[in-house]
Image: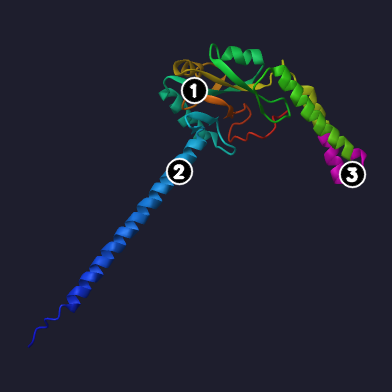
Amino acid sequence: MSVSTDPTPRIKREHIVWMAAGLVIVLLGVGVAVLLAKRNTDNKQAAELLGQQTSGGAVVSIGPLDGTALSDYLPPRRSALDKATGERAAVVSFDHYMTEAEARSAVGQLQVVALLAAAPGAAPSVVNGDMASWAQQQRAATTQERDADQELLRNGVDDPDFKTFYTQEVARLNRVLAGIDPNGRVVFGAAVKGPATELQALAKKAGVRLVDVAPSAKVTPDTEYRGIRPEQTITVNQHDPRPF
C-alpha cells in the first residue's frame, strides 16, 4: 500500500480553515459595529426622550416630546434631579394653573427664564417677555383666525357640514378670546435657573409636579422649553389645546 505524499489536499484544507476563520472575524466585526450603532442610537433617543438634548455644551431643549408616556418619563427625570449638582436649568411643571405672580412666588429665588402658559381652549406657548405682551399676541392671532372663519361663512360656505364646523369654530375662538387674561390662571410651568439644591427643594413643594432638570445651566434664546400640563396624566402632547 502506498502513502500519498501530495501536499495539495493539506494545503486546500488549510486554506478552507483560514477562510472560515476570516469569515468569522468579519461577521463578528459587523455584529459589533451594528451593536455599537444601535447603542448610540438608543442612547441618543433616550437622551431626547428625557429632555437632555445639548449642542456644544448649550441646552437645546428641556422636556418631553409629543407622545411621551408619563409613567416612563417621570421616574428617571426625578432620579436625574436627585443626582444633579452645581448650577442647572430646569422646566418646572405645576399641578394646577397659576397666575404669573403665583408661579413666580412658587419658584422662590430661582431665576425665571420664561413662563409656560395656555389660555382656556388655546394651545400652550412660551412667554419670554411680560404677560401683557403675551396676551396681546394671543388675542391678535386668535382674532385673525376667527375673522378668517367668519369670512368663509359670509362668502359661500354652502355645504351644511362645513357651515356647522366653521360656525362652531367661530364660537370656540370667541370663548378663547374671552379667556386670554394676562392676570388670570394661565401659567402651568416655568423655565428656571439656579443651584441644584434649590431645584431639589422646589420639587418637594406642594403644587409642583416635576422639576425637569437639564444637564447644565447654559441656555440660549433658542432653547426649547416643554412642560407637562395639569390635565395631561397619561401622555404628553405639546400642541393639544387646554380644555375650557
Which amino acid is tagged 3?
Val
Q: Looking at the picture, how far across and down is residue 112, in whole percent?
A: 58, 17
Asked whether 212 or 215 is in front, the reply is: 215
Residue receiving disc 3 = 157
Most common secondary structure along the magenta stretch: helix
Question: Regarding mark 3 in the picture, which secondary structure is present there?
Answer: loop
Q: Residue sitting at 51 percent across and 29 percent down?
A: 59
**The C terminus appears in which quarter of the rendering?**
top right
Which of the two labelled residues, at mark 2 and mark 3, occupies the earlier sequence position?
2
Which amino acid is tagged 2?
Asp
Residue 111 figure quarter: top right
Q: Residue sitting at 23 percent across and 68 percent down?
A: 17
Distance, label 2 to label 3, CA atoms, is: 49 Å
Residue 180 seen anywhere in this rendered image of the structure: no
Number of other residues with Cα within 10 Å of mark 1, as a class: few under 14, some 14 to 19, many 20 or more: many
- In front: mark 2 or mark 1? 1
| Span colored in magenta | 153-170
Q: Looking at the picture, how far across and down is residue 69, in whole percent?
A: 55, 37
Question: Residue 42 shows which numbered tag?
Answer: 2
Residue 70 figure quarter: top right
Number of other residues with Cα within 10 Å of mark 2, as a class: few under 14, some 14 to 19, many 20 or more: few
Residue receiving disc 1 = 217
Pointers 2 and 1 in contact (C-beta within 8 Å): no
Pointers 3 and 1 in contact (C-beta within 8 Å): no
Position of residue 95 in the picture relative to residue 160 (left or right): left
- In front: mark 3 or mark 1? 1
Asked whether 12 or 75 is in front, the reply is: 12
Number of other residues with Cα within 10 Å of mark 3, as a class: few under 14, some 14 to 19, many 20 or more: some
Which amino acid is tagged 1?
Ala
In the displayed structure, 4 sits above or below 54; it is below
Pointers 2 and 3 in contact (C-beta within 8 Å): no
